[in-house]
Image (cartoon, grey):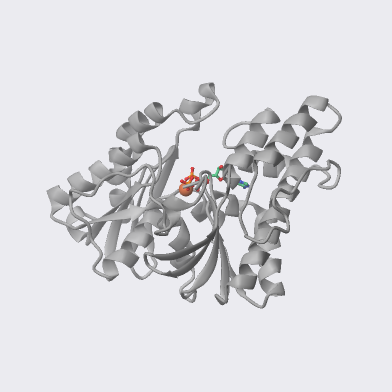
Amino acid sequence: ALILALESSCDDSAAALVTSDRQILAQAVVGQNEAHRPFGGVVPEIAARAHVEILPGLVRQVLADADVVVSDIDAIAATAGPGLIGGVMVGLMAGKGLSLATGKPLVAVNHLEGHALSPRLVDADLDFPYLLLLASGGHCQLLEVRGIGEYRRLATTIDDAAGEAFDKAAKLLGLGYPGGPAIEALAAEGDAKAVPLPRPLLGSKEPHFSFAGLKAAVQRVVASGDHRPEDIAASFQQAVVDCFVDRTRRALEVSDAPSLVVAGGVAANRSVRTALEALAAEHGRAFAVPPGWLCTDNAAMIGWAGAERFALGLTDGLETPARARWPLDPEGDKVRGAGV
Ligand code: ATP
Ligand code: FE
């Protein structure tokens, strides 16, 4: 099947054409960094308006790039949440409009399921179940992925998301947004042992995450002026990696899933990838991580999640709501400070 996909849940507008046999016929992502930079973070209203301006051109572009006409498409996949509600509404309404105009079914995709299934787009051998570390701008969770729409959450962050921690640390260091790539680049010049920083929740029984205390520590270190920025960046990155490894090791002790997978924007980080690959090997598990471009927001992963759902007959009606919050697991809304 051929899926046309739209993504608009944060500050990236994206469209893609993906097939159920794992071909990406075309994809395009337009970031909005310039529009938000003067404000030092994503402004929801500006993001929503930018999606309105950018998305129609992206749809035309991917169709032209792949030499496909709308009648060739089998289904329209659009992110229906979670995310900034204005942007989600823009993409979902565009998807509904395309569905209505073409008569092709709509697949309303959970953005987190897009991240969660993204490694399967590039790895045909990655079967369910797998243990997933989902580390993104808005989330930090450990989930057992048992199938499409079947998630068991083992842990979440009790305060900030992992990507949010990178973004806040970058802001404190005077680096641009998004902070993750900037921290990673600066960290390459620094000494990860130079600055003592906390590893919140290290060793605790439940594999939850916490990054607020780490951010506060970075704030103090930056204010003290005692350390070089590259050493702070390297030490911060190492602290996050140590938390990931410790918490994921705990989850591996309680999950017998044969594979470990990392996805979400923070999975683009090379130190994160290397450390978790080593952890998987240590525990005799297979390891998968999508290529960097598939870790950060894109529409190919939405198209792939759409293809997986469409193959199971899971399509959605035009009454499907846009959702600002949409946990992957049924218990999601009940967990303290859910980070969802
Ligand atoms: P969510 O998926 O939770 O709704 P989001 O879609 O905004 O949030 P993603 O696009 O999945 O988040 O990930 C973006 C986050 O990943 C940002 O916080 C960014 O700083 C972080 N990130 C991107 N690249 C890197 C990197 N190389 N190292 C560390 N963090 C990174
Ligand atoms: Fe995302």
The N terminus is located in which quarter?
bottom left
The answer to which image quadrant residue 194 occupies is top right
Q: Is residue 280 left or right of residue 48?
A: right
Residue 326: x percent and y percent?
A: 38, 50
**Residue 226, relative to residue 83: is it above or below?**
above
Please provide percent x and percent y for residue 247. 66, 59
x and y percent of residue 133 in the render? 56, 59
- Pick the residue in front: 109 or 199: 199
Task: Decide if residue 16 is on the left or right side of residue 142.
Answer: left
Residue sitting at x 64%, y 62%: 248
**Front-most of residues 259 and 175:** 259
Numbered label tally: 0
Name the residue at 73% across, 31% down: 219
Q: Residue at x 33, y 44 (%)?
A: 323
Percent from the top left, x then y, of residue 13? 39, 41
Given residues 296 and 252, the one toward you in this image is: 252
Whether residue 274 is visible to the viewer of this picture, yes or no, is no
Q: Is residue 39 left or right of residue 46?
A: right
Residue closest to the far top:
38
Residue at 32% in and 60% down: 306
Q: Is residue 323 left or right of residue 155?
A: left
Q: Is residue 293 visible?
A: yes
Q: Quadrant of residue 207?
A: bottom right
Tell me the quarter of the picture where residue 179 sits.
Answer: top right
